[in-house]
Image (cartoon, rainbow, N blue to C red):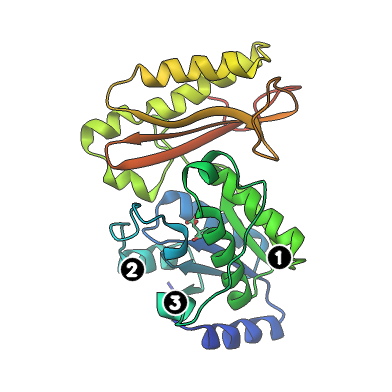
Amino acid sequence: MKAVRVVRNVRDMHRVADRMRMDGLRIGLVPTMGYLHEGHASLMRQIGRVTDRTVVSVFVNPAQFGPDEDFKTYPRDFERDLAMVRSEGGALVYAPSAAEMYPDGYATYLEVERLADHLCGASRPGHFRGVATVVTKLFSAVKPHAAIFGQKDAQQAGVVRRTVTDLNLDVEIMVAPTVREADGLAKSSRNRYLTPRQRRRAAVLFRVLQEGRDLVLAGERRASVVIDAMCRRVSGSPGVEVDYVTAVDAEAFRPVEELGGRVLLAAAVRFGESRLIDNIVVETERRAVQEIR
Ligand code: PAF
C-alpha cells in the first residue's frame, strides 16, 4: 500500500495540485471533518472511479459550528483517518490548521441566500455560511476537477452546488447515496456520541422517514398529513427531542403545502447530546429515488 502524503498548508497544497494538473491528472476531492467512517470510504471509492488522484481534506471547521455546538468535542483521530485513506487508495490528505485557514485578520465569508433559510439553516444560524466559505477555500487550495458530498447532508450539497454555479467555479459536484448501518441509521461521525441505548433508539430516525415515504408513495399529497404522521411517530419514541421533521421541495429546501415533483423528507433529531440528521428523496411522479428498503 502506498504511503499517503500529508499537506498542512495552502502554499504546499497549491504546489502539489499544480504539479498534478501539469501531469494531466484529474483531482478528486473528498471534503471531511475527519473521524472517517464507511460513508467517507464510499465517497473515496466513488470519486476514485472518475478521477486520477483522490485528495481527502480533514479539517474541523470552526466557522460552521455555533457557540453552543460541539466544535470542541467533535471526534478527532488523525492517525485512524490516515489509515483509512491509505487503505482506500487515497493519494493525499490536506489537513490545514485553523490558523492556516483563518489567520489573524480573516474577514471574508460566503453567504448563500434562500437555500440556507430552512431545515439546518434555520436551526443552526451561520452554519451554511461556514460550510460555503470553507468548501470554497478547500476548492481554491486543492484545485479539484470534481468533489463529492453525501446525500445525508442534502442541504449542504445544495448549498455547495449553488456556490459553485454562482461563483462560476470549475468543479464538478457529485452527490453519493447515504451509507447506512444494518438497522438503517445513517453513518455519521456523530453516532459515536450515542450511548448503547440511544444508539438502539436512533434507528427510529430512518424508520420515520420510510413511513413518510410510504405515505407519499401511497398517494398522499398533503404535506401537513405526511409531516404530522412522521412527527407523531418520532415524538412517541422515548429519549428523542425533535429539531425538525418535515417534507420540503428537494431543490429549494422550501416548505410546500402540496407535495409534487422531487420531495425531500428530512429530519433532525436529538438523542441526548447527539443531533442526528437524515433524509429520503421521493419522486412523487414515480418511485422513491433513494434507498427503497
Ligand atoms: O460534511 C462535512 O463533513 C463538512 O460540512 C464539510 C463539507 C467537510 C465542510 O466542513
- For marks 1 and 3, the one nearer the N-term is 3
* Residue under the point 34% across and 31% down: 202
* Label 1 CA crowd tier, 10 Å (few <14, some 14–19, many 20+): some
Q: CA distance from mark 1 to mark 3?
A: 21 Å
Q: Is residue 131 left or right of residue 162?
A: left
Viewer-proximal residue, 88 or 266?
266
Where is residue 273 shown, x and y percent of the image?
28, 42
Where is residue 141 shown, x and y percent of the image?
59, 77
Disc 1: which residue: 171
Q: Amino acid at mark 2?
A: Phe
* Label 3 CA crowd tier, 10 Å (few <14, some 14–19, many 20+): some
Q: Is residue 148 visible?
A: yes
Q: Amino acid at mark 3?
A: Pro
Q: Which mark is residue 38?
A: none
Dot 1 falls on a residue whose secondary structure is loop
Dot 3 falls on a residue whose secondary structure is loop
Tell me the mark number nearer the camera, choosing from 3 and 2: 3
- For marks 2 and 1, the one nearer the N-term is 2
Disc 2: which residue: 78
Where is residue 215 shown, x and y percent of the image?
59, 14
Q: Is residue 105 above or below residue 274?
A: below
Q: Is residue 97 visible?
A: no
Dot 2 falls on a residue whose secondary structure is helix
* Label 2 CA crowd tier, 10 Å (few <14, some 14–19, many 20+): some
Quarter assignment of residue 3: bottom left
Viewer-proximal residue, 265 or 187?
265
Disc 3: which residue: 96
* Residue under the point 28% across and 22% down: 238
Quarter assignment of residue 75: bottom left
